[in-house]
Structures are given as structure tokens and as C-alpha cells.
Image: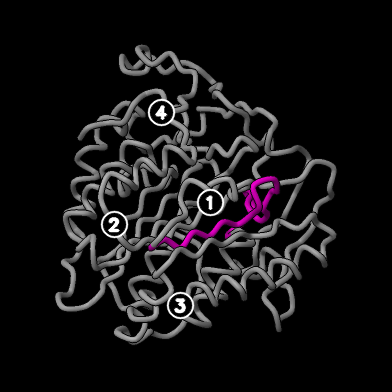
């Protein structure tokens, strides 16, 4: 598949030729840009705070309930650099080079498994992208999107999941720039780009320069920015799109992604962090509030966003956190299109959240 210009990519600093030759002897990886030194979306100088449980319930401890949103820790900011140990690669997995070279076939199989669209009606197809392989929280949300689309929105086989996670190196295509391009190409062949609705959900860490972390150490993966995501989505003339970016500083994606026929939602303002990831977390604040609480209460994406924004604000106020202020941009025509889709689909029962296994 054609790749887009290198000038738009932000590639980590690796000895790439040595990687291809199999000489994976480094213990850390340096990336261009900067990323959290800890494993959470965080604000410098704040203290550890337990996320409140969903409204109307008592906040359980982490060990008592996997559905409890994540702990928001903050020993460093999202702009501090980090070294990730490549020794975390699972012993029973193929080598990084084998995983890397298997990607074209992995993506081909994933695209081939997509169900055909139902003719004569608007279909919804989703692409979920879990970008950071060092935390399960992003995998959990990517796979939960698949569950929602399959069960709640009665569209089984309509989701492509790209994720970076040690547990899924042989079962899911990597969340990479190249696979994202290929996934969009594959969806365009299954969907009717003029009639159907494309939903894209991206979850990972974000930097104040609005670059998203795409990482599966020690495989060299290009980072994703607003210009890059906009360019990838423009490869095909999808008339109707819902794009969700769940990351710190994700409001910076709205100017490049918004427009007629598009609904764009982000978990934070362009100059604010969001909360709830980390190695001890199962789901982020925004993932809990919009995906689980919001979309299980209503199939209306915009109404669910309103519920989620209020819920997140209450959690942040309770824990004395600087407001993330999730953002939304509603393009001309998309609300009417989504309403027509909802009228043609009988929403299923609420889908309980469980961490991926």
C-alpha cells in the first residue's frame, strides 16, 4: 500500500538496520518528542487521587472492581521524556522482527474478517486504535469499542481493532501508522463511503505538541499527529465520520479533523491533560464516562458526550484536579445522519465493561 510522505511522520530514534538484522540488544528506546516518565495521564505537582465511581454507586477499591475508573497519578508531566525497557517483550512471543514482518498478513486477515454491510440502510463501521503498548488501559478501550459496536449497536464484524500490547502480538494487527492507512483502505472497500458512518476511536498518551504516542518497544513505530491523522482519513471520501481522540492535549486535533459531515470529540482541551490511564488502570476517565456510562445510557453520541463531560467534571472537582474540559465539534449534517442511523437500528442492552483478557 502506498505510504504517505516521511515529512509527516515522527519516528523514534532506533538503529533500524540493526533491528531488521535481528540485533535487538538495546535496553531502552529514545523517541523524538517527549512522553510521560510515569504510566499515566498526569499533571505536574498534583497528588495521587482515586477516580470516583460512576454516579450513584460507591467507589470500590481497585482490587474489588475492574470497572472502577483508573487512578490518576502525577509524579511527572506528560512532557517529560522516558526510557522504556525493551526487556518487557514477552518470552513466549515471536521476536520483534517476526512480529514486524508479519504485519501485512495480520492486517489482511483482520480486514478479510470484516462483515459485509447490510444493503439498503446506513451501516456503522469502527476502527479502534490503542497506541501505547506499555499499558493495558488502551487495549481495554480498543476492544471494548468492538464489544459496543457488535452488541449495543447490533453490528457484529464491523470493527477493526489495531492495538499495541504484549498479549496480542500474534492476534491483533499493531496500532501503527502503516496499519492505520491499510485499515482505512480496507474499510473503504467494505463500506459505502457515501452512505455509511465511519467511527474512529484513538486512545493513547498525548503530548503538548499534539503528537500521540504510538509505541510497541522495541519495534520502531512512527508517531501520529493531527496532520497525519487528517491525511490518513482523507485517503478516501468518507462523507460521514465520528472521530474520537482520547489523550492528553487531544483538543489540538479538532482544527484538522472537524468539518461538514464530521463529529469530532476529544477527552481534553488543546492545552489540558486528561486522566485515568496508568499500569494499575483498567479504563480512562473519558473511556468510562463516554464509552461505558454514556453510550450504554443512550445510543446518541452527542448526548453521551454531554453526559460524559458532566461526569468527568464532577470526578475532577471531587479530586481537586485541573479540569480536562473535553471538546466537541459537530459538523453540518452529521447529527441528522446519526439520528437516521439510530432510527434504523434497534440498540441492544447495555454492555458491561470488563478488562480485556
Q: Give the main secondary structure, helix, strand or loop, of the magenta stretch.
A: loop
At a point 43% along the width and 30% down the height, the residue shown is: 222
User: How packed is label 4: few (under 14 Cα within 10 Å), some, or many (20 or more)?
Assistant: many
User: Which residue lies under the disc numbered 3?
Assistant: 351
Tag 2 secondary structure: loop
Quick check: is 35 in the magenta stretch? no
Relative side of 46 to 117, left or right: right
Viewer-proximal residue among 345 and 18: 345
Dot in front, 1 or 4: 1
Quarter of the rendering containing residue 191: bottom left
Q: Is residue 42 above or below residue 330?
A: above
User: Which residue lies under the disc numbered 2?
Assistant: 238
Residues in magenta?
Answer: 261-283
> Which mark is drawn over residue 219?
4
Contact (CB < 8 A) between labels 1 and 4? no
Viewer-proximal residue among 331 and 28: 331
Mark 3–mark 2 distance (CA, rounded to whole Å): 28 Å
At a point 65% along the width and 64% down the height, the residue shown is: 69
Amino acid at each position: 500500500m502506498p505510504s504517505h510522505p516521511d515529512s509527516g511522520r515522527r519516528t523514534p530514534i532506533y538503529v533500524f538496520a540493526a533491528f531488521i538484522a535481528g540485533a535487538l540488544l538495546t535496553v531502552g528506546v529514545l523517541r523524538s518528542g517527549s512522553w510521560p516518565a510515569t504510566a499515566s495521564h498526569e499533571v505536574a505537582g498534583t497528588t495521587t487521587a482515586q477516580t470516583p465511581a460512576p454516579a450513584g454507586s460507591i467507589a470500590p477499591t481497585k482490587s474489588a472492581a475492574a470497572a472502577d475508573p483508573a487512578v490518576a497519578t502525577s509524579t511527572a508531566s506528560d512532557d517529560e521524556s522516558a526510557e522504556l525497557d525493551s526487556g518487557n517483550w514477552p518470552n513466549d512471543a515471536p521476536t520483534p522482527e517476526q512480529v514486524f514482518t508479519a504485519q501485512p498478513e495480520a492486517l489482511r486477515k483482520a480486514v478479510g474478517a470484516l462483515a459485509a454491510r447490510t444493503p439498503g440502510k446506513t451501516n456503522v463501521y469502527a476502527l479502534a486504535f490503542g497506541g501505547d503498548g506499555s499499558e493495558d488501559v488502551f487495549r481495554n478501550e480498543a476492544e471494548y469499542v468492538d464489544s459496543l459496536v457488535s452488541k449495543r449497536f447490533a453490528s457484529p464484524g464491523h470493527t477493526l481493532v489495531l492495538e499495541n500490547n504484549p498479549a496480542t502480538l500474534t492476534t491483533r494487527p499493531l496500532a501503527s501508522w502503516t496499519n492505520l492507512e491499510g485499515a482505512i483502505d480496507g474499510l473503504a472497500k467494505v463500506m459505502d463511503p457515501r452512505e455509511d458512518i465511519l467511527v474512529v476511536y484513538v486512545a493513547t498518551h498525548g503530548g503538548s505538541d499534539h503528537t500521540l504516542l504510538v509505541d510497541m518497544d522495541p519495534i520502531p513505530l512512527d508517531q501520529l499527529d493531527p496532520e497525519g491523522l487528517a491525511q490518513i482519513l482523507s485517503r478516501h471520501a468518507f462523507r460521514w465520520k465520528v472521530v474520537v481522540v482520547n489523550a492528553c492535549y487531544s483538543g489540538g486535533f479538532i482544527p484538522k479533523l472537524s468539518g461538514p459531515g464530521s463529529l469530532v470529540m476529544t477527552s481534553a482541551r488543546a492545552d489540558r491533560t486528561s486522566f485515568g490511564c496508568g499500569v494499575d488502570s483498567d479504563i480512562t476517565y473519558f473511556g468510562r464516562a463516554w464509552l461505558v456510562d454514556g453510550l450504554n445510557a443512550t445510543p446518541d453520541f452527542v448526548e453521551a458526550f454531554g453526559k460524559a463531560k458532566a461526569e468527568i467534571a464532577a470526578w475532577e472537582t471531587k479530586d481537586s484536579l485541573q479540569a480536562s474540559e473535553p471538546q466537541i465539534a459537530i459538523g453540518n449534517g452529521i447529527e441528522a445522519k446519526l439520528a437516521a442511523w439510530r432510527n434504523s437500528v434497534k440498540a441492544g442492552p447495555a454492555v458491561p465493561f470488563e478488562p480485556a483478557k
